Amino acid sequence: MKKYTAKGATIKQLRDGLERLSTQKEMAAEIGVSERKLRMIENNNAAIPMTTVDRLAKALGVRREQIIYSEGGPAGVEALEPPIPPVPPVNSASEERPQIIPRFDWDYAYATSDETRLYHEASHSHDLVTTIEIAFTEETSAYAEELFEILGGLTYAKRDILKNIEPAEEIALRRRIRQLLVLLKGNDVWVYETSFFRRLPERMTLPPDGEEHTLQSRLLVALAPPGEYGERSLRVNIDHGQPFVLLSLKSLKAKSGRGEDAGA
């Protein structure tokens, strides 16, 4: 497995600036390494696999290239990059207090070549939204347009959900999705996907207490170049429909405890 040299001082400075995960113990648990390993990363620029780079970047709220050296390691003493204010990862609840998740936020979409997953996600989503972060040729533009048309046509917004898709049609659609994924990847166009729920009605401010809302599932498909450092995820913008409050872990645990007590 290929490993990358960490910018230890940068990682430490970014971690120290966090409200949550500011200690080595918390950060190590978040990214799935031992405290000893994290100390080696921060103090000795230890080499780490891309999976660890990805988890670190997400926890710190920065791009991967900001916390690893592009070629092997430091040449002499490198000037420390100015810290970038971390962006809280989506679905990351604070241990102590609730978080307000804005309507317009970001998350990671992940590279896929699995036509079964794309078919399933599209056919179980209300609608499809697309992101394009690569220049197309006439050929790849046609492939992308067809892929979006197929996936969009599978969503609840574009088909009669009371009618089942015939097996022969499903097989043909999945076969064509697979072909398009191969054709796009062969032209260095990777397909990334993620799903999330939107809260409706749309609004820019937090809803009043007690106001009801509906949830609609949305599939996001992004087309972009391969990851420069081998990463298989892509940061994408998402629209939650309206801001909402994400309860803290402490609140969720307390709520769960009350539920168990009531059921006893």
Image: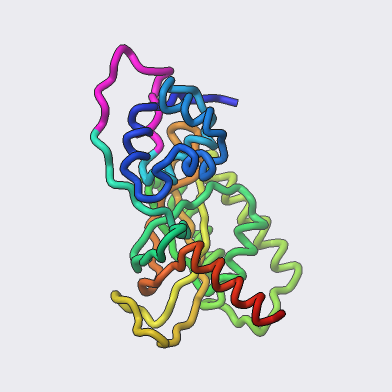
Q: Is 154 displayed left or right of 188 in the figure?
A: right
Along the viewing direction, whichever of 210 and 161 lies nearer the viewer: 210
- When the figure is inspected, residue 164 is found, relative to residue 140, above or below; the finding is below
Name the residue rendered at 45%, 39% in the picture: 56
Q: Is residue 185 left or right of residue 199?
A: right
Q: Is residue 187 visible?
A: no
Identify the coloring: rainbow
* Residue 16: in magenta span: no
Q: Of 258 and 42, which appears nearest the observer?
A: 258
Q: Quadrant of the C terminus?
A: bottom right
Count of residue discs:
0
> Relative to the observer, which residue lies in front, 187 or 241?
241
- Please tell me whether residue 62 is drawn above or below residue 264 in the rendered image: above
**What residue is drawn where x is 39% and y is 72%?**
244
Q: Residue at left 42%, top 27%?
A: 42
Q: Nearer the viewer, residue 143 or 8?
A: 8
Residue 106 seen in this snapshot: yes
Magenta stretch contains residue 70: yes
Residue 135 percent across, percent down from the top left: 36, 45
Q: Position of residue 51 (x, y in %)?
A: 54, 37
Secondary structure mostly seen in magenta is loop
Magenta residues (range):
64-81
The image quadrant of residue 203 is bottom left
Residue sitting at x 34%, y 84%: 208
Q: Is residue 148 left or right of residue 238?
A: right
x, y (%) of residue 39?
Answer: 47, 28
Residue 41: image location, x then y, percent: 46, 27
The N terminus lies in which quarter of the figure?
Answer: top right
The residue sitting at the top extreme is: 76
